Image (cartoon, coloured by chain):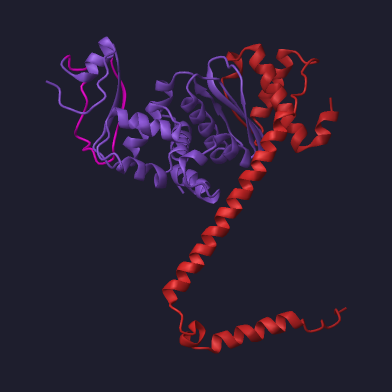
Chain colours: A purple, B red
Amino acid sequence: MSPGERAEARIAELGITSPQELDIELIAMDACMTVVYEDLDGCEATLIGVGDRAIATIKPSPSRGRQRFSVAHELGHWLMHRGLSFRCRVDDMDLNFSSDQVKEREADTFASHLLMPTPMFYPALQSFGTPDFLDLEKMASAFDTSLLATCMRLTDINTLPVVLACYSATGLRWHKAAGDIPRRWFLHQQLDDDSFAYALLQGGRARSSLGKQS
Amino acid sequence: MTSPPKKPDIENALLDAHFAELMGMTDEEILDGADPEKIRAEGLQLLQNARAEAGRRRLAKAKASLEAAKVVSMPAAADITPMEARHYLEQAANNPLFTMAARSLSDMSDEDVLRRYRQLRRLEQETDPNKGDEE
């Protein structure tokens, strides 16, 4: 069973059928993982487990969605990587999402499916047709997830031709394409200065609706 | 030495007889005029309801545990130095009984090390209450 399937099987086992019922602390406690929120030095979250009990320590964040993702990520480690020792999530979300470590990716996939299970996420997505950023913000609000995690899940579910990319002033940091995007397509290392993304990066001017650049 | 012959179990005998009777019946006799698709749908619905109820009970139990966990205090680590705590955690990291996701111990602040040590001791005491008496 893949990490995503494991997460969704858990949600089904618990009889959860709506995003409002996705109480991550309860789901964690059901797996004997207690969640505590305390300030951490250099880590987004840590996990410690003895036998079949664990404590996940989560760094408090103003973004509830980000906190919930961290809890779900640690729960993924607890359920899939029990008995092992490894490095924690760092406190840079971009670096976490671009991590190429197998266990980290597995825990991220688990978390993404746990908080946005396909049987709930797909119908919600379908109701928007071709969603723009405002619609994705509504999805994020409904699932109590961050906009970034919601966009990652949108890419992962592969129903729309989406390429999610993260650029900094120095260029492309990471990207993720939907499964059906042809592999031969590639992203430029630098943003086109006539693009909406460039305007957002340089001037913070976000365009929430879809449309072509002039 | 042989054990005395067992008395025939009346419940098993009844079950065997009932099973044999069912196996001898035709599909039409078993369905007794009912729609097989409807019976299947009803069976699946019953199963789904039972699963949902089991899930709700698990979550209710988790909620009670969550409330109880709020009043559990972390054991104090007054008599241990950060260096001793680091050593303890280092040993635990190599034991498959323990699961750990953290920064490298050498990169962790003393405060983080002591917190993790306290958490580890709490879990050890929860899983084996006699463990707390060792120190």
Q: Position of residue A214 (x, y in %)?
A: 11, 20
The answer to whether A8 appears left or right of A30 in the picture is left
Q: Position of residue A88 (x, y in %)?
A: 53, 24
Looking at the rendering, in which quadrant would you find the N terminus of chain B? bottom right
Considering depth in this image, is B118 or B86 the residue closer to the camera? B118
Considering depth in this image, is A54 or A211 the residue closer to the camera? A211
The answer to whether B126 appears left or right of A142 in the picture is right
Residue beneath the point at 53% across and 15% down: A42
Looking at the rendering, in which quadrant would you find the C terminus of chain B? top right
The answer to whether A68 appears left or right of A31 in the picture is left
Residue lying farthest to the left in this orientation: A214
Magenta segment, prevailing SS (helix, strand or loop): loop
Can you see residue A161?
yes
Up/down of A101 relative to B55, above or below: above
Residue A70 on the magenta segment: no
Residue beneath the point at 69% across and 38% down: B65
Considering depth in this image, is B28 or A99 the residue closer to the camera? B28
Considering depth in this image, is A101 or A178 the residue closer to the camera? A178
Up/down of A137 relative to A18, above or below: above
Can you see residue A190?
no
Residue beneath the point at 15% across and 16% down: A194
Q: Position of residue A46 (x, y in %)?
A: 58, 25
The answer to whether A47 appears left or right of A11 in the picture is right
Q: Position of residue A98 (x, y in %)?
A: 38, 26
The answer to which image quadrant residue A204 occupies is top left
The answer to which image quadrant residue B132 occupies is top right
Up/down of B123 relative to A93, above or below: below
Residue A179 on the magenta segment: yes
Q: Which residues are magenta?
A: A170-193
